[in-house]
Image (cartoon, rainbow, N blue to C red):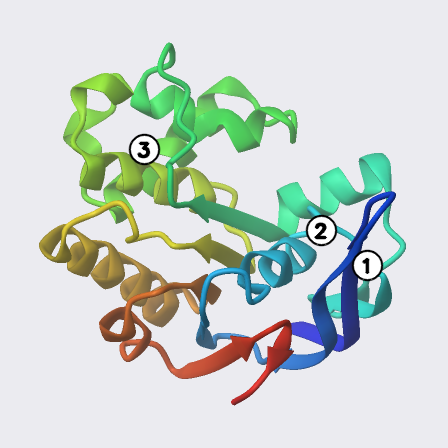
């Protein structure tokens, strides 16, 4: 489902060049739940951003869902991201002026899905995360754990093949973090969704199928 071939990424300024990733190779089969760990600044988020077509590699090729997407640009990138990928962020990124169900519907607006179908799919996604009774609430009326559930519902509403999660339990206590992991595990097992998760928490990483460790932009295990 994900194939990274000899990926390197460097950032340049007038005075310095920073190498964020060095010759990274990674293969993630369909239906795997993979976690990525490593110290701050080791390249974890850069790697996730390259998988998510948010950033481009300086070298190497990216294959997602059987398509080489390394040279995708503009609307082609946006369309592929919207149809194939779901994103979950540590800080939720919900829109406070929209209700929960309207936040969940957002990815479907870009697909031009009709209003009735959007609402049905959003309700289905909220049911998956146990928040059907919060559909008309607003983000400022929710706990941190509930906000993350809404973010997961938004990520899965378009039925993506791949979910990319950047520290999805990082802002939560251990109990709420465990509940979020329960939801992700259930999505992986019941829907067969491929999940790649960046985390600092060994306990959460141990609940996934496989752990990849990074250090100084390189894969060390």
Choose the circle earlier in sequence order: 1 or 2.
2
Q: Are marks 1 and 2 in contact (CB under 8 Å)?
A: yes
Write the residue at 36% across / 45% down. Answer: 152
- Secondary structure of residue under mark 3: helix
Find the distance from the CA under tag 1 to the CA under tag 2: 8 Å
In depth, the one of 184 and 117 nearer the eye is 184
Residue 213 image point, x, y percent = 49, 80
Residue 85 image point, x, y percent = 59, 51
Query: Which residue corresponds to mark 3?
Result: 123
Find the distance from the CA under tag 3 to the CA under tag 1: 32 Å
Query: Which residue corresponds to mark 2?
Result: 53
In depth, the one of 193 and 74 nearer the eye is 74
Toward which corner of the image does residue 110 lie, by quadrant? top right
Query: Which residue corresponds to mark 1?
Result: 69
Write the residue at 47% across / 65% down. Answer: 195
Residue 30 image point, x, y percent = 55, 76
Q: Quadrant of the N terminus?
A: bottom right
Residue 24 in view of the camera: yes
Q: How many marks?
A: 3
Please give left or right for residue 210 compared with residue 160 in the image: left
- Secondary structure of residue under mark 1: loop
Toward which corner of the image does residue 147 lie, by quadrant? top left
Write the residue at 32% across / 74% down. Answer: 205
- Secondary structure of residue under mark 2: loop
């Amino acid at each position: 489902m994900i194939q990274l071939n000899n990926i390197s990424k460097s950032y340049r300024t007038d005075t310095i060049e920073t190498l964020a990733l060095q010759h990274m190779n990674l293969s993630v089969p369909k239906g795997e739940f993979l976690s990525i760990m490593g110290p701050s600044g080791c390249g974890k988020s850069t790697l996730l951003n390259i998988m998510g077509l948010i950033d481009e590699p300086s070298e190497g090729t990216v294959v997602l869902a059987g398509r080489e997407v390394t040279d995708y640009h503009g609307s082609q990138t946006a369309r592929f991201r919207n149809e194939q990928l779901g994103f979950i962020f540590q800080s939720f990124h919900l829109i406070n002026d929209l209700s929960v169900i309207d936040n969940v519907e957002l990815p479907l607006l870009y697909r031009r899905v009709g209003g009735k179908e959007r609402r049905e799919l959003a309700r289905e996604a909220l049911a998956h995360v146990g928040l059907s009774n919060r559909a008309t609430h607003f983000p400022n009326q929710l706990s941190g754990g509930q906000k993350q559930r809404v973010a997961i519902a938004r990520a899965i509403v378009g039925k993506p093949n791949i979910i990319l999660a950047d520290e999805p339990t990082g802002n939560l206590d251990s109990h709420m973090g465990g509940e979020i992991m329960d939801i992700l595990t259930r999505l992986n097992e019941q829907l067969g969704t491929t999940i790649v998760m960046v985390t600092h928490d060994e306990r959460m990483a141990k609940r996934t199928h496989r752990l990849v460790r990074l250090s100084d932009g390189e894969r060390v295990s």
